[in-house]
Amino acid sequence: MTETLERLVAHHANTLDAAIDAVETRKNWSPFRDSPSSKFHDPGKPEAGKAAFEALLGKSFDLDQPGIVGWLGCEVSPFTRQPLGIIYPASDPEALIEAAQAAIPAWRKTASEARIALCLEMAERIYDRNFEMAHGVMHVAGQSYTQAFSGSGPNALDRGIEALAYAAKAMRDVSTSARWERTFGKEDVVLEKQYTLVPRGVGLVICCASFPTWNAYPAMFASLATGNPVIVKPHPIAILPMAIAVQECRRVLADFGCDPNLVTLAVDAIEAPIAQRFIAHPAVQIVDFTGSPRYGGHLESTVTGKLLFTETAGINSVVIESCVDLVETARAIARATCLFSAQMCTSPQNIYVPKNGIVTSSGHVPFEDVTLALVDAVNAIADNPAMAAGIMGAVQAEASCDIMWRLEQEAEVHPAAQVLRRPVPYIHPDFPGARTMTPLIVVLPAGNEELYAQEHFGPVMFIIVSENGNEAVDEVTRLVREHGAISSYLYSTDEDFIEGSLDSYAEVGANLSINLHGAMWANFAAAYSDYHVTGLNPAGNACLADLAFVANRFRIVQHRRPAARKGIACAA
């Protein structure tokens, strides 16, 4: 390592040590503040971030990279309904792949500690632009300002650093050399062995539209840390956040004498997608995908001879068997359903309630009163524009609104369904023209899976009448096995029922939250502590993050030779 890189490794050593300690203890830790409150940041930082975002609008994005053949950009803000007007350099895929390949030899020989330190420097610099990034995420994805600042900023970067911690653990576990001795017959054999970590090849990171950074950072850092260059392909309607991230990564690499083409941006248009050109190229050996189950399933069935990591979506369900306080339980479920207008991979959709009602600390509550409590809890958010703006944000795409209108029409004519709440917009106090949609709530008996046995990407809550808690768990876990789920939720005061349900959820690879209430969102996932996705059901084949997410991104090559005998010099 050069002296400059050695200083960088020392600079970030404490952060890496703390991250490794966090993943080993699973405790709460982060090197970043995830609140935009001015008491945590330098004066003028929020204003400067907003000004920096606004300075990007209507211009070409400053990103000098290989093979630029044109300029693309079609992002439209869900809040203003106006185009951002930013255009990005569109590079020829072959040129990006060639540039990435050319960067591999020197990057492979860069010490793993230095590669990790460079990634930590990237994370630090991206965080330094987080106020700017928050506005960027808002105006391409539709997240509220607070959620864009935290969930798509520090929380996503934490997932990236979590991957770095596992990469460090995986690579440190491989000894660089060994002296091996054994007697064969009358001969003593002594060998010197050397072990070399070799990267798999070029990595492609395909980002989703609604949460562009969340899966991107861990994928990027896991590949870079283990010696692989990365090509980032954002969704065509949500390019800006990843363009900012790639810009900073390239600057860090250049600043420390590394090839900036280790990280490049591959933009495309909806009508002319390019992901398959990268996937089909033999040099691309790692594919990280976040997005629709349709395309994710296609990749899982067609990508061979390469590493593929997917996170798609599933049917997230809540079973209310009993609870202490119905109002608090309904509030927790409503908040999780309303957060980002249910455009999150952890948003609950199907709420199971026993037909005879539930038992609470105040006594028995009939089914109808449980449904009323859920509707009231949603209304408390949806009917308060200021609260709705902070929680729901905006709906990213008109297609999600269309889904809600179609579901409402189907429920209206369905013989067993009853619409309890219609999906109507709310008026955003800061952006009156924002695309918004409050939840559709439909009640119907179990068994009507034509309506609820798939993920509907938007704000909908199906309240499903179950025979009892056990039958609800049976159906939920069957749907997880068949269609996948990323987050499952259970409310019960019966410890025997809870214990009896745990194996059912575990067997289908469903992460389960039990009796969560209060200030923390029920669907909040903490980096370094919560495992996000299990890889055991159709919602994804990989976990964020564990050793398996990084350990196979490099392989081990060895060479061995007889050891020099003591007192005998080797020939010149």
Image (cartoon, grey):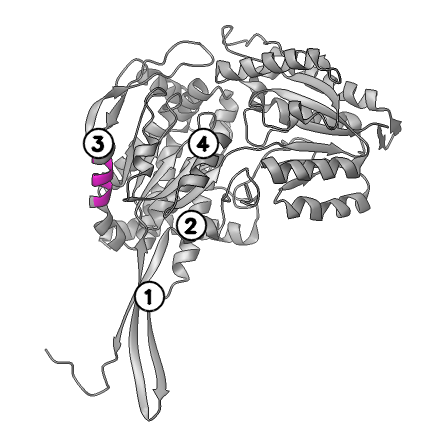
Q: Give the labeled residue for mark 1.
A: 176
Find residue 379 and report its horizontal and vertical position in percent: 69, 15
Q: Amino acid at mark 4?
A: Tyr
State which quadrant residue 350 falls in. top right
Taking 529 as reference, is 202 left or right? left
Residue wearing tag 4: 295
**Residue, x 89% and y 29% (percent of image)?**
364
What is the spatial separation of the Cα atoms under label 3 and label 1, in whole angstroms? Answer: 35 Å
* Secondary structure at numbered mark 3: loop
Q: In the image shown, does 504 or 513 lie closer to the viewer?
A: 504
Which of marks 1 and 2 precedes in the sequence?
A: 1
Residue that carries the numbered disc 3 in the rendered image: 65
Residue 26, relative to residue 57: is it above or below? below
Q: Residue at x 73, y 38 (%)?
A: 473
Q: CA distance from mark 1 to mark 4?
A: 40 Å
| Separation (CA) of disc 2 from disc 4 | 23 Å
* Residue 76 sits above or below residue 275 on the image: above
Q: Earlier in the sequence, mark 2 or mark 3?
A: 3
Label 3 crowd bin: few (<14), some (14–19), many (20+), radius 10 Å? some
Q: Position of residue 36 (x, y in %)?
A: 49, 26
**Magenta part of the chain:** 95-101
Looking at the rendered structure, the secondary structure element under dot 2 is helix
Q: Name the residue that disc number 2 marks.
A: 550
